[in-house]
Amino acid sequence: MPDANSLYGPLDPAPDAGWAEAGPRMGFFTDTSVCIGCKACEVACKEWNGVPDAGFDLLGMSYDNTGALTANSWRHVAFIEQPRPAGHRTPPFAGNPTGAPVSADAAAVGAGTGGPSGTVPGVPPGDPDAAARMVTGPTAPTTGNGTVGAPAGANGTAAVGNGTPEAPANAIGAPPAGTAGNGANGSQFLGMPGAQPPGRGTGAEGRADFRWLMMSDVCKHCTHAACLDVCPTGSLFRTEFGTVVVQEDICNGCGYCISACPYGVIDQRKGDGRAWKCTLCYDRLGAGQTPACAQACPTESIQYGPLDELRERAAQRVATLHERGVPEARLYGHDPTDGVGGDGAFFLLLDEPEVYGLPPDPVVTTRDLPKMYKRAGLAALAMVAAAVAAFVGGNS
């Protein structure tokens, strides 16, 4: 007999789907506070599941070039660049950093004037200007022979090795015309990876508030999965682990599941037409293995296990972060009483769900089916009654 909460409310989905001897429900807990944006999970997912590449385009809007969950990206590490950290209690980077900037040895290697060190500094090889700016800041152009020069003069001229103003201000390696050479009134060289720490030259008062929020997004494997409910072919099914899997061999490409998903996870593959999404590595679960993405995560941001244990662990992690002065830490998708009955893949977030592109209050799209059928039935009865009344009244 169907559970009273089969369409809405708290539920153990595997037994409700007919698995008589289902074990504990399995799922993901993704702790975004320790995600470093390495995208190892994306690569591992593609390699294990044979997911084709999603193109190698640069989106031009973020360092995250995956962009979104698609039929060819079942994991998506989102980079959320925030000019001002929301909810911070104290300004970040309060105080001055200690220690020297990049080492002179590394700068020499980058300039092509030193021997190889076994590492590649974050400057183009043979570029003494960039290397000099890494060591001394953005105000040290060099002469043509690679000698690091003195800072540019305040009159907009560049200085050569002996400090004599010689090169015009708009020469290669010199600050733009109209600036004092220190970037205070114009643009300045910020450096590629390996530049000085933020605010090194300006002090704490000159630093802008900025942070990256990183989150490895995935199918939520909802307790009440609308995609599964609307599938006309049975291509989507509930596994004994409580997860939702697409059987691509019987998918007819109707697309009903795509519009039904409250998270916008499922997608059709171009040239294929069928729907694809994360399977939570169903084949690996059956063999007692950890899903590929969780196995590859170097910081354990993605944790796999029995859902009840993960929820307890997540609650403890939130409490720890609150004690450490991060009151904005919160869980998303963990509540069995929410609009989808809780997610099989839930998250610890450091800001509002909307910041991460998540709906603040997702609701399973089939929740109102009983009411809709009831109203449709009442409307049908009313039409029949009106037709009978008209017929009887016409005969009399």
Image (cartoon, rainbow, N blue to C red):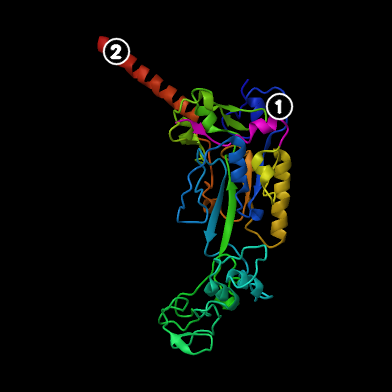
| Residue at x 59% of width, y 51% of height | 215
Report the amino acid beneath label 2: Phe
Residue 278 falls inside the magenta stretch: yes
| Residue at x 42% of width, y 78% of height | 171
Please provide the residue range marked out in magenta.
273-289
* Residue 157 seen in the current view: no
State the image quarter where residue 395 is shown.
top left
Residue 99 falls inside the magenta stretch: no
* In the depicted structure, whether residue 166 falls above or below residue 229: below
Circle 1: element type: loop
Circle 2: element type: helix
Image quarter (top left, top right, bottom left or bottom right) of the C terminus? top left
Report the amino acid beneath label 1: Ala
Residue, disc 2:
391
Residue, disc 1:
22
The disc, 2 or 1, on the residue closer to the chain's N-terminal end is 1
